[in-house]
């Protein structure tokens, strides 16, 4: 007697639940992620075993490249505007509303204040090219770096200072930055490093 033939049914997998989970995960990562700021120079930070995290808001970041050029950034646009206006008053420079808007939207700044108006009038792609070759003066003759930090602190008293320097940056440059901060009685700041594993004994 022959076997009964069972008709094969096509397999159907309902993907609705998986699609819902995918969309939820995607939404979660979009809302919780933070964008990395565009920096004018590439910096390789030294390694350390410290796990202290820098806060995400109210941060004044000082970026020092291997050649010793100094750049700065603030995370709030209103702080950026207030700092630029204060620097303009201190150095007798009047910025137009368009220049202020461009400065507020920039992720990092670092040109001498006397060149700032001309710099802000340039298209964005040209500003990016020029910025990496400039830097905020931080010498004994013209220490504009101290003025920027002082005016940033005036604009936002809750600022946390973070220094991000390249591992190959000469110590004398870092010492000059730290001395300038000490002159302003800014003795608390964070050094941004990359995490390394503790060596096993």
Image: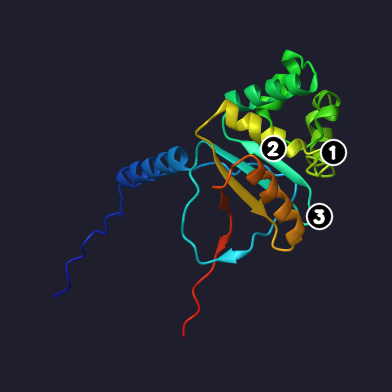
Q: Is residue 47 left or right of residue 41?
A: left
Residue under label 2: 108
Mark 1 or 3, nearer chain start: 3
* 28 up-or-down from 102: above or below: below
Left of 48 or right of it: where is 67?
right
Q: Is residue 165 visible?
A: yes
Give the quadrant of residue 47.
Answer: bottom right
Give the label, 1 or 3, closer to the camera: 3
Figure colour scheme: rainbow
Marks 2/1: CA–CA distance: 12 Å
- Looking at the image, the residue that sits furthest to the left is 1
The residue beneath circle 1 is: 130
Q: Residue at x 66, y 27 (%)?
A: 105
Residue 182, given in percent of the width and then of the height, sits at: 63, 46
Task: Please indicate whether residue 3 sits to the left or right of residue 96 in the image.
Answer: left
Q: Residues within 10 Å of mark 2 (few under 14, many from 20)?
A: many
Q: Quadrant of residue 172?
A: bottom right
User: In the image, which disc is placed on residue 197?
Assistant: none
Numbered badge on residue 67? 3
Disc nearest the viewer among 2 and 3: 3
**Distance from Cα at disc 2 to Cα at disc 3:** 17 Å
Tell me which numbered mark, 2 or 3, is placed earlier along the sequence: 3
Query: SS of the residue at dot 2?
Result: loop
* In the image, residue 121 above or below residue 132: above
Query: In this view of the protein, which residue sits in the foreground, 33 or 186?
Result: 186
* Location of residue 77 in the rendering, given as x and y in whole percent from the top left corner: 60, 26
Looking at the image, tell me whether mark 2 or mark 1 is earlier in sequence order.
2
Is residue 42 visible in the rendered structure shown here? no
Q: Is residue 126 depicted above or below 46 in this figure?
A: above
Dot 1 falls on a residue whose secondary structure is: helix
- In percent of width and height, residue 4 lies at 17, 67
């Amino acid at each position: 007697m022959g076997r009964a033939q069972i008709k094969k049914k096509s397999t159907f997998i309902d993907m609705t639940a998986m699609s819902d989970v995918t969309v939820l995960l995607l939404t979660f990562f979009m809302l919780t992620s933070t964008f990395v700021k565009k920096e004018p120079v590439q910096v390789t930070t030294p390694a350390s075993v410290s796990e202290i995290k820098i806060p995400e808001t109210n941060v004044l970041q000082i970026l020092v490249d291997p050649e010793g050029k100094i750049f700065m950034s603030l995370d709030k646009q209103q702080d950026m505007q207030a700092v630029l206006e204060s620097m303009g008053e201190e150095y007798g420079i009047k910025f137009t509303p368009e220049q202020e808007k461009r400065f507020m939207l920039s992720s990092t700044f670092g040109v001498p204040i006397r060149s700032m108006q001309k710099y802000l009038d340039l298209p964005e792609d040209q500003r990016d090219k020029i910025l990496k070759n400039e830097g905020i003066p931080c010498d004994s003759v013209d220490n504009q770096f101290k003025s920027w930090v002082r005016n940033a602190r005036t604009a936002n008293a809750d600022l946390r200072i973070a220094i991000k320097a390249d591992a190959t940056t000469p110590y004398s440059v870092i010492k000059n930055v730290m001395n300038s901060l000490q002159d302003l009685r800014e003795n608390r700041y964070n050094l941004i490093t990359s995490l390394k594993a503790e060596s096993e004994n």
